[in-house]
Image (cartoon, rainbow, N blue to C red):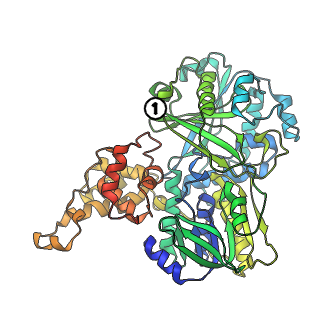
């Protein structure tokens, strides 16, 4: 079991000069590959210049889906793989991945047939989605998919809904509702609709937590696996075999000689390869931005359904229920740099598109509690006029420059839903290169708090844990909803000491925090507990307070990222942070 602190890991790195595989980039694809390789007993080092899952992987629409619209591009293999991986994740990570009923508003029955056929045959779309301002100002109308096209698409989509072997999950089939029934269920919906279609995909409630659980449990299972955040690649040494790494906290540099490098830096792939003296031009990314709204009326209007529809300009957009808030997305704009933010033009575009489906609901800028934006690491296909036609499939592009002692595997494309299959593919290729064989399969390996998940009777699980540690069942339920069965470890950490309080003469041997009420709620985020925060800071590689607010919790996404919260968390975690 690897239970080293970050400081210990850096010390061991300074004493170590070689590793079989160096993975650069700790987004979901890099993390999944790290996990799969470690399970095959490969010594592997995962590094990232930022925190785990802090780049593109933290900027998703929170959907786990097969990609209904990819059918228009003829990407049947990708859709089949994604649908089955969606069903698999519902079983392997049930604490974070949940079924998501999705509603498509339909405004006519027959439009879009010829345009969809042309797109399927590889013809260009009638316009480019290159910039938001041009589309907003031009008022250009994209082809709207009518009920006939939506029906055909959903029928094809569900061909692959049959569960693969060993996966018991199967989503319900779609259904259509005519205008009267639709408006009865969604009263604020535009009266211009002729029908709605209801089908099922899935939502990942805490994508960053799913990622960090993969990291932590991988290190616990393998002595030869090490993951270090805020450790960047700065270049090569004079030797063609040595990669230079730098700790972004202390500035200290390290040298490592890998047999194989896996570049999983997403939109930074080409920039990373330049540092490795292996220049490439693989990425032609597009930017996707989202808003999070605190809007009770809109939240009530969509209920527990995601609203998924085509805006007037032809873009696919969505309204996703997220606890008491609504996530609104997304844009699809070509960009040439990996660092992006949500612009005012995008905000205007996203707010205006809500009126397309809910014309009587007004949204103010003041109701935006959070924005996030990322770059999709799509393949360089700048000749494609429409960004929507660029493939979302994943591929491994292998580079080996003369004079360099190691090849670089470049993970281009991919999506949250298919992280496991991408990792499986790259691991198999890595094992072949290293001359090793696979010994463990990940297809049915539970993830984090999904282990021993009580699918049928979670209430009994809650009552059992509450009774054992003498905790209010409501607290257990809250933590179970947040961490799945992993909640038991946190509850044990916080409440078990209370069952046998230390005697006064032991006080001098203990940390001050052993005598602080760790069951106390935070003053600025009452759903979290002091002991819970300290446990996560200690066990989940938190380096900065921001890591907890944005990626170990969903406090930022819920609009609770305040100076007061930062100050409180800093005081609670101060003795546990490495900086």
Percent x, y of residue 465: 31, 58
Q: Quadrant of residue 231?
A: bottom right
Q: In this view, which residue lies farthest toward the left?
A: 504
Q: Quadrant of residue 347?
A: top right
Residue in view at x 52 percent, y 59 percent:
51
Residue in view at x 61 percent, y 17 percent:
180
Residue in view at x 63 percent, y 66 percent:
24
Percent x, y of residue 346: 62, 33
Q: Is residue 569 above or below residue 403?
A: above
How many labels were placed on the picture?
A: 1
Is residue 444 or residue 316 the one in the foreground?
316
Q: Is any atom of residue 168 visible in this view?
A: no
Is residue 439 or residue 351 the one in the foreground?
351
Q: Quadrant of residue 186?
A: top right
Q: Is residue 20 above or below residue 460?
A: below
Is residue 295 or residue 252 the one in the foreground?
252
Percent x, y of residue 249: 48, 65
Determine the secondary structure under disc 1.
Answer: loop
> Is residue 185 rendered to the left or right of residue 405?
left
Q: Find disc 1 in the rendering and name its residue.
A: 294
> Is residue 212 rendered to the left or right of residue 514?
right
Q: Is any atom of residue 132 visible in this view?
A: yes
Q: Is residue 135 above or below residue 370?
A: above
Residue in view at x 45 percent, y 51 percent:
456
- At label 1, counting other C-alpha atoms closer than 10 Å, the crowd grade (few under 14, some 14-19, many 20 or more) is many
Percent x, y of residue 219: 50, 71
Image quarter in which the C terminus is found: bottom left
């Amino acid at each position: 079991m690897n239970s080293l602190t970050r400081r210990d890991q850096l010390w061991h790195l300074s004493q170590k000069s070689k590793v079989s595989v160096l993975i650069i980039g700790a987004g979901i694809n890099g993390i999944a590959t790290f996990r799969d390789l470690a399970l095959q007993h490969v010594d592997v080092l995962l590094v990232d210049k930022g925190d785990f899952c802090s780049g593109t992987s933290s900027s998703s629409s929170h959907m786990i889906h097969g990609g209904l619209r990819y059918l228009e591009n003829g990407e049947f293999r990708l859709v089949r793989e994604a649908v089955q991986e969606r069903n698999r994740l519902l079983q392997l990570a049930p604490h974070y991945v949940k079924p998501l009923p999705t509603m498509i508003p339909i405004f006519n029955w027959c439009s879009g047939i010829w345009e969809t056929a042309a797109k399927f045959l590889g013809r260009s779309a009638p316009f480019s989605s290159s910039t938001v301002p041009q589309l907003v100002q031009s008022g250009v109308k994209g082809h709207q998919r009518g009920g006939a096209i939506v029906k055909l698409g959903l029928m094809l989509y569900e061909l692959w809904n049959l569960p693969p072997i060993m996966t018991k999950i199967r989503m319900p089939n779609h259904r259509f509702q005519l205008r009267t029934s639709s408006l009865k269920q969604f009263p604020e919906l535009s009266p211009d609709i002729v029908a709605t279609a209801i089908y099922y995909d899935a939502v990942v409630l805490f994508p960053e937590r799913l990622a960090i659980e993969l990291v932590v449990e991988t290190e616990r299972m393998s002595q030869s696996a090490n993951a270090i955040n805020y450790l960047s690649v700065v270049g090569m040494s004079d030797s063609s075999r040595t990669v230079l790494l730098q700790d972004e906290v202390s500035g200290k540099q390290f040298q490592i000689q890998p047999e194989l490098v896996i570049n999983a830096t997403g939109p930074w792939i080409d920039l990373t390869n330049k540092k490795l003296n292996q220049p490439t031009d693989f990425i032609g990314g597009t930017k996707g931005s989202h808003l999070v709204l605190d809007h009770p009326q809109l939240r009530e209007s969509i209920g527990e359904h995601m609203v998924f529809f085509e805006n007037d300009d032809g873009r696919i957009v969505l309204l996703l229920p997220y606890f008491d808030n609504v996530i609104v997305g997304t844009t699809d704009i070509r960009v040439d740099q990996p660092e992006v933010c949500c612009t005012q033009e995008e905000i205007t575009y996203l707010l205006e598109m809500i009126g397309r489906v809910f014309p009587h609901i007004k949204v103010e800028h003041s109701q935006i509690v959070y924005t996030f934006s990322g770059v999709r690491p799509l393949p360089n296909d700048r000749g494609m006029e429409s960004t929507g036609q660029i493939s979302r499939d994943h591929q491994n592009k292998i580079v080996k420059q003369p004079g360099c002692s190691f090849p670089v595997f470049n993970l281009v494309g991919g999506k949250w839903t298919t992280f496991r299959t991408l990792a499986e593919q790259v691991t198999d290729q890595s094992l072949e290169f290293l001359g090793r064989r696979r010994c463990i399969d990940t297809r049915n390996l539970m993830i984090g708090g999904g282990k021993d998940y009580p699918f049928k009777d979670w209430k009994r699980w809650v009552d059992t844990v509450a009774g054992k540690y003498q905790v209010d069942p409501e607290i257990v339920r809250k933590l179970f909803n947040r961490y799945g069965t992993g909640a038991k470890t946190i509850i044990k950490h916080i409440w078990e000491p209370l069952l046998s309080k230390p005697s006064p003469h032991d006080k001098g041997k203990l940390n001050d925090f052993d005598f602080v009420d760790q069951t106390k709620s935070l003053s600025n985020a009452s759903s979290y507990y002091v002991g819970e925060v300290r446990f996560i800071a200690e066990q989940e590689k938190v380096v900065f307070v921001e890591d907890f607010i944005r990626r170990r919790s969903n406090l930022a996404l819920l609009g609770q990222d305040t100076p007061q919260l930062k100050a409180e968390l800093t005081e609670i975690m101060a003795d546990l942070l490495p900086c």
